[in-house]
Amino acid sequence: MRRLVTLLAITLIAVCPPTAGHTMLAQQPSGTVTVRAARVLDGKGAALQDAVVEIAGGRIVRVDQRTGPVTYDLGTATLMPGMIDTHVHIGWHFGKDGRASNEGETPAEMALFAAENAWGTLINGITTVQSAGAIGDKDLRDA
């Protein structure tokens, strides 16, 4: 579990580095980051051994088996693409009364809970979601 948390933290730092004490997801980081892992699942069906993932401008630009120094060496870890959840209700949450009800919440409170759910989803390795289509999800998606 500790290794997974470390891997996720390194991935998030590489893709979304902290700026002035805050993580700016919308801002594209400058520079190039390289991450080596014992195994890399490339998302196309291949598993590369001792592979390097190169990230530039917040995007993966290359996966290969080059040698040489890297920004982060994950040792024996396996690096894989983010997971996909094809059915979510990103705005659903337990209310102040402990029940799955949003009754009495302002639109701003509902948006904050949805953003919290989106962050929790991302930090746990799910990088793509498909909402069931609630109208309130559109603003969060666009943001």
Image (cartoon, rainbow, N blue to C red):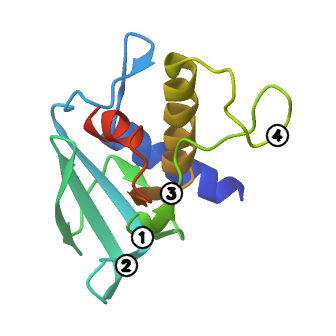
- The reply to whether the C-beta atoms of the residues labelled 1 and 2 are less than 8 Å apart is yes
Q: Amino acid at mark 1?
A: Met
Question: Looking at this rendering, what residue extends furthest in the top direction?
Answer: 20
* Residue neighbourhood size for the residue with mark 1, other residues' Cα within 10 Å, grouped as few (<14), some (14–19), many (≥20): some
Q: Earlier in the sequence, mark 3 or mark 2?
A: 2
Q: CA distance from mark 1 to mark 2?
A: 5 Å
| Mark 4 element type | loop
Above or below: residue 120 compared with residue 53: above
Q: CA distance from mark 4 to mark 2?
A: 40 Å
Where does label 1 land, which residue? Answer: 80
Q: Which label number is shown at residue 137?
A: none
Q: CA distance from mark 1 to mark 4?
A: 35 Å
Residue at figure coordinates x 62%, y 50% from the top left: 5
* Residue neighbourhood size for the residue with mark 4, other residues' Cα within 10 Å, grouped as few (<14), some (14–19), many (≥20): few
Q: Which marked residue is nearer to the observer: mark 3 or mark 2?
A: 3
Question: Looking at this rendering, what residue extends furthest in the right direction?
Answer: 97
Whole-percent x, y for residue 41 in the image: 37, 78
Whole-percent x, y for residue 6 in the image: 58, 49
Q: Which label number is shown at residue 41?
A: 2
Q: Which marked residue is nearer to the observer: mark 4 or mark 3?
A: 4
Q: CA distance from mark 3 to mark 2?
A: 14 Å
- Quarter holding residue 99: top right
Where does label 4 land, which residue? Answer: 99
Whole-percent x, y for residue 61 in the image: 14, 58
Above or below: residue 54 compared with residue 27: below
Q: CA distance from mark 3 to mark 1?
A: 9 Å
